[in-house]
Each structure stands twice: as structure tokens, then as C-alpha cells.
Image: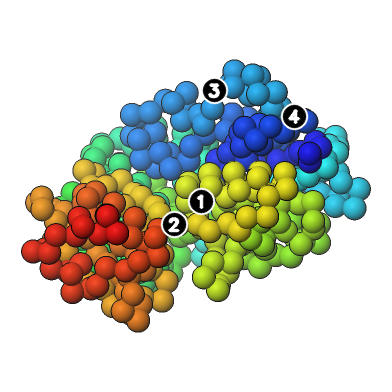
Amino acid sequence: MAGDVVIIGGGQAAVSCAAKLRALGHGDAITIVAEEKTLPYQRPPLSKKYMAGELSIDRLLIRPADWYVEQKITVERGTRASAIDPAAHRVILANGRTLGYRRLVLATGSRPRRLPSAIGGDLPGILTMRDIADADRLAPNLRPGQRLLIVGGGYIGLEAAAVAAAKGLAVTLLEAAPRILQRVAAGPTSDYFRALHQRHGVDLREGAALSCLVGRDGRVAGAQIGDSTLIQADLVLIGIGILPNDDLARDAGLAVENGILVDEQCRTSAPDIFAAGDCASLLWQGERIRLESVQNAIDQGEHAAACLLGSNAAYQPHPWFWSDQYDVKLQIAGLNRGYDSVVVRPGTRPGSQSVWYYRAGRMVAVDAMNDALNYSIAKKVLETDRSIPAEQAGDPAVDLKPWLRG
């Protein structure tokens, strides 16, 4: 057995790893070091149902408090790990305490990218959306008539825009790229969500070169676009992506490159240290990637637990993601990296459709908007390493259900 296990991180990967260790029969001590004071909770609903007031913190918790007691898992809450000593097998905490380990798991997650201070990125009052403290700062200010400026047209920014617009705020969203979602989706998906937000009154400005954020009375109050356009705002939210929390690993001498490098068993360059979740850089289909999703955090956390106990199985993820905006559920299967063509399939209900991605004639991903059936078909086909021909995927007259049977 692995002996005492310390897991640094208070998110889904950490809890999934701890739960799997117990399920596999690990009987020695398990300690989770969580920087936040709250028990580990789900993050995706923060920019959706939690911020909208539809979910309480108790319903966000990944596991209730008594589960940790029953499983004999210690959660060090409000505790930051400041250093790792791999040679001595010790974690040094910010309060001066040390924790010894036989095996260590880094599930340190990620943090929001920030704008440079040179353009006002350090002005007081700038909001981000990554943890419950961020959501709690933003939610009370979501009042009808308030002016919200969002910088960044990715999924976090669009989800926040949807919640705010539904609450009656005047929302302006700036995207520096020529179109929203440019980094993560094809043009038809961008077109779909642009039209959706514009129907709900969001002022979308694409190709908007942010010159700087501006302040008034000691806090951020808007943004200057280009040479002269000034957008005033009561609230400013930055949603320009995330960075992996790999500083602890780097400082400890572990291999790091846009995340903590892990092998197929989730092992880092130190043999007794594993990593999982947003912070981990894994090899997938011949290239290094980080999978920023709940499902990967769960699956990779569980896989790390099994390998920590001796399994040599290779981690083989099947990426999938989702986003909720207004009454639209976007479901994504696969990764569209390197796609060279897309086809659009109209859905059977008004407002539903799917966008299918191909690379060298082979299906690699799908975006499905209120189209659960075609999402399910595509997801299963991708998981079995098959491909639906583009001419069939793009033809609504072709029944794709036979592909569910292989």
C-alpha cells in the first residue's frame, strides 16, 4: 500500500482522488490541504445557477461534511501549502506546520488570467469568476439597471453575461479577437451564441482592442476602446482564460510546461508525486494538453489514485464539456484542435443545432446546442474511436441513431 497520502488542492480532482483511494481499499491516512475555508465544492455552477441565486452553498458541496468523517479523510481548510520538499517527503504549510507523506498528489487547479497593471489591471474593484468568493462579490451587485462590462468572450464571460442580462443589467462584452469563442469554437458556434446574446440585449463588441481600464474615485469604472471610445461601467468582470497553478511544483524542481508534466499514470517527474486536474499537462494523441473540465478532474483524480496504489494503466480521456446560457445547453464532445472543416446539422426543435468538426476527413468533436440526441451519438462514436462521415452528419435527412449501435 502507498502509506500516508497528502493531496494539495480543494477541488473536484482532490476529492475524487481521495474517494477512489478509499474505494480501492487504501487504509492509511489521507489529508486534503485546501486553501479555501469552505469544504470542496463544484465550480461550474458558480457562473450559472449559484450566481443566479438558484443554488445554495450546501448544494454546491462535492461531499457533505459527515462524509469526510466517515471516510477518515482529514481536510485542512483555510490552509495554504507554501512549499514541497520531495527529498524529505514533506509539505510545508504557510502557517509553519509540516506534513509528511509517502505519496503526494497535486490537484492545485488553476487561477484566472489578469490584465497587466500597465493598462489598469490592478485597479480596485475588478472582478473575476473562479471561486465562491468571486461569485459572492459579484452576485449582490447584479441589480437591474447596473452597467456590467465583461472583458473576454469565452465561456466564462458569456455565462456571466447571460446571468446578468437575465437579471436586468445593461451588459457590454468586449472580445479582442474578431469573434467570440474564437479560441475554442468554429464560426457557426460563435454565430449561434452571438445571436443568442444579442436577442437578450447584450452589447457584444468583437475585435475590440482594449486600450486600458479606467478608474474613478479610487476604483475601476470602465474601459477605453481604441483611441477614443470610453465605456462606463458600474462593474467590470475579467474573463480572459485561466493559468495552471504549477508554482509549487516548479519551485520543488518538478518538470513544468504550461502545467505540471505527468505521464500516462499521472506521475510527475518525481516518482512519489502525482498530479491531476486543471494543473496537469498530459500527453494526448501525441501532444501535450491540459483539460479544463470537471469530468477530466474526476476521471484523472480517480486514475491517479489507482496508479498511486500500483496500477500501470494508461490514462485515456474522452473529453466532454458543457455550458448553460439562458435556455440553451451547449454540450461538447471531443477536442476540435487542428480541425480543417465543419458541417452544421439543424436540430429537430427550433433553436437547436450541432456543429461537427473534422480533421483530414475524420470527426474529432461536436458542439451541440439544445441537441442532446446528436451530442450523445457523437460522444459515443468518438469514445469508440469511430467517425461519422461529414456528408451524413450534415444531412438532417440522415438518421444517425444507427451509429449508437456501432
Residue 22 seen by the camera: yes
Say which amino acid is labelled 1: Asn
Label 4 to label 3: alpha-carbon separation? 21 Å
Corner quadrant of residue 8: top right
Q: Of the residues tagged 1 and 4, which is closer to the observer?
A: 4
Q: Which quarter shows the C terminus? A: bottom left
Label 2 to label 4: alpha-carbon separation? 31 Å
Label 1 to label 3: alpha-carbon separation? 22 Å
Note whether 360 is above or below 70 in the view shown: below
Q: Residue at label 2?
A: 319
Q: Of the residues tagged 4 and 3, which is closer to the observer?
A: 4
- Label 3: few (<14), some (14–19) or many (≥20) C-alpha neighbours in 10 Å: some
Q: Residue at label 3?
A: 64
403 vs 203, nearest the viewer: 403
140 vs 179, nearest the viewer: 179
Which label's residue is closer to the chain start, 2 or 3?
3
Find numbered disc 2 in the image and state the secondary structure of the residue it sits on. loop
Q: Residue at label 4?
A: 27
Say which amino acid is labelled 3: Pro
- Label 1: few (<14), some (14–19) or many (≥20) C-alpha neighbours in 10 Å: many
Q: Is residue 173 left or right of residue 79?
A: left
Q: Which mark is residue 296?
A: 1
Q: Of the residues tagged 1 and 3, which is closer to the observer?
A: 1
Say which amino acid is labelled 2: Pro
